Amino acid sequence: MTEMWERFSYYGMRALLPLYLIAPGGLDMNPATATAIYSVYLSLVYLLAMPGGWFGDRVWGPRKTVAIAGGVIMLGHLTLALPSEGTFFAGLGLVAIGSGLLKSNISTMVGHLYDGPEDPRRDGGFTIFYMGINMG
């Protein structure tokens, strides 16, 4: 369920962010600036997965990192709801950081649920996990 909501957040941002950036009721930016911001956001979500994975391995562990990442993503979306350009960029940064922390660690958590790669339940577990991703 956590991965489903993270994907819902990510793909929802992919759909709505460019519209909000260029809309007269939104930030009313020119398309070139909006494209740059959109590209940086999408890049950071995936680039932050490497330090997020390192952080989960070395500092908090995967379970605690996923829980904190979910909170950071939620805080980012709440910050995005505040009507200011500064809070918009802060919220976007929080969502990217939270997604980077979550992406690499949640797969590790699913893998650790089972007794090694030979456990016959492992494939079924990852199938359920990927179904959650696709639903999101």
Image (tube, grey):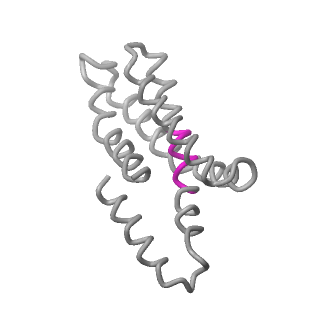
> Residue at the location (62% across, 54% down)?
62
Find out whether residue 130 is within the magenta segment: no
Q: Is residue 64 left or right of residue 35?
A: right
Nearest the camera: 2 or 50? 2
In the picture, residue 132 is in which quadrant?
bottom left
Q: Is residue 61 above or below residue 126?
A: above
Nearest the camera: 92 or 9? 9
> Residue at the location (52% across, 65% down)?
110
In percent of width and height, residue 74 lies at 45, 33
In percent of width and height, residue 72 lies at 53, 35
Find out whether residue 99 is within the magenta segment: yes
> Residue at the location (52% across, 36% down)?
71
Please, which residue is most extreme toward the top here?
84
In percent of width and height, residue 26 lies at 29, 19
Q: Is residue 62 above or below residue 112?
A: above
Please, which residue is most extreme toward the left here?
24
In the picture, residue 67 is in which quadrant?
top right
Please, which residue is most extreme toward the right here?
58
Nearest the camera: 55 or 127? 127
The span shown in magenta is 96-104
Q: Main secondary structure of the magenta part?
A: helix
Nearest the camera: 33 or 55? 55
